[in-house]
Image: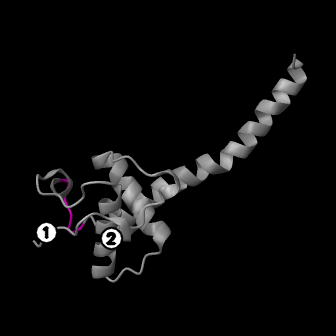
Amino acid sequence: MMSKKRLVVLVLVLFALAGPAFARAETGALRGELLYSTHCIACHSTQLHWRDKKAARNWASLKAEVERWQKTSGLGWREEDVTDVARYLNALYYRFPEPRGDAASTADAAAPAPAR
């Protein structure tokens, strides 16, 4: 059986190793919200995400829409920025299952959104 001292050390080590991962996830969510609030909200109301004909149908298409609109707006975001904004929108509105490790790229999106 493991001694109390070893158990405490093991728990501390696990928390120390998990801490950076939790911090990155929280930082990404905050970055996504900040980027969206700064660059997107001027043109997008919450109705855009709730409407019947929304373009995002799954995680890959949500990322593709974020990628498409950041390019259209000339923002020059990195892949991490697109992912952070997509995660923010997904948590707030969509709740699509997200692939492990975010393996889906914007190129993996299903059919393109219909013309508006």
Q: Residue at x 60, y 46 (%)?
A: 22
Q: Residue at x 38, y 54 (%)?
A: 88
Task: Inspect the image, locate mark 1, and give the three-letter code of the amino acid beneath it.
Answer: Pro
Q: Which quadrant would the N terminus be assigned to in this image?
A: top right
Q: Please, is residue 59 above or below residue 39 in the view?
A: above
Mark 1: few/some/many CA within 10 Å (<14, 14-19, 20+)? few
Residue 72 position by quadrant: bottom left
Q: Is residue 53 left or right of residue 73?
A: left
What is the spatial separation of the Cα atoms under label 1 and label 2, in whole angstroms?
Answer: 23 Å
The stretch of residues the image draws in magenta is 42-46
Q: Please, is residue 96 above or below residue 67 in the view?
A: above
Q: Residue at x 47, y 71 (%)?
A: 79
Query: What residue does disc 1 label?
Result: 114
- Sequence-wise, the earlier of marks 1 and 2 is 2
Magenta residues, dominant SS class: loop
- SS at mark 2? helix
Query: What residue does disc 2 label?
Result: 39
Residue 59 makes an appearance in the image: yes
Task: Inspect the image, locate mark 2, and give the three-letter code of the amino acid beneath it.
Answer: His
Residue 97, percent from left and from top: 38, 46
Q: Which quadrant would the C terminus be assigned to in this image?
A: bottom left
